[in-house]
Image: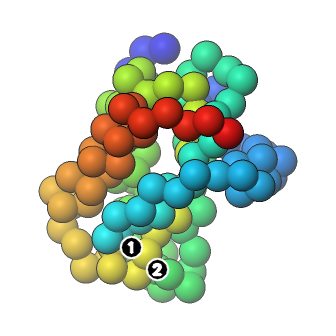
Amino acid sequence: MSAHFPRSARLLQAQDFKFVFAAAKPYRSRAFTLLVRKNNLQHARLGLAISKKAVRKAVQRNRLKRLVRESFRQWQNKLPNIDIVVLAKPEAVNMRNPEINKALEQNWASMKTNSVNK
């Protein structure tokens, strides 16, 4: 895969999200919870589930989604064949962009080194 973010690298259907939620391994940081499950594809896929309850304003939700997508785009070729659903925590709103990027990179790096068996 190249460094862009194609449709094939996204979780788009409800059944894809249900698959991850059914038996996911959580990776937690101050800003996010990432639910991860091994897939049968040859690449990683990303899904975003950033709720209004956790992040009230649409501008803030969109900012977080942009940052997560960009970080994933840069790391997707280094990740194993997994499906990832990103859930935001309310603390993420108050964090600056470099802090969010650092938190995400730490999660991506731990996913790369740890095996996801499910």
Q: Is residue 62 left or right of residue 118?
A: left
Q: Position of residue 69 (x, y in %)?
A: 43, 45
Q: Which mark is residue 55?
A: 2
In the picture, measured across the screen, residue 104 lies left or right of residue 102, that is: right
Tag 2: residue type? Val
| Mark 1 closeness class: few <14, some 14–19, many ≥20 residues within 10 Å | some
> Who is closer to the viewer here, 105 or 51?
105
At mark 2, the secondary structure is loop
Relative height, residue 6 to residue 72 (above, below): above
Is residue 6 visible to us here? no
- Gap in Å between the C-alphas at discs 1 and 2? 7 Å
Image quarter of residue 40: top right
* Whether residue 50 is situated above or below residue 48 in the rendered picture: below
Q: Which type of secondary structure does the marked residue at label 1 adopt?
A: helix
Q: N-terminal of the two: label 1 or label 2?
A: 2
Where residue 68 sits: x, y (%)? 40, 51
Q: Which residue is mark 1?
A: 60
- Do the residues under discs 1 and 2 have CB atoms within 8 angstroms? yes
Coordinates of residue 4 in the picture (x, y in percent)? 43, 25
> What residue is shown at x 18% (from left), y 67% (from top)?
96
Note whether residue 12 is visible: yes
In this picture, residue 12 sits left or right of residue 88: right
At x 63%, y 42%, the residue is: 37
Residue type of the residue flagged with mark 1? Gln
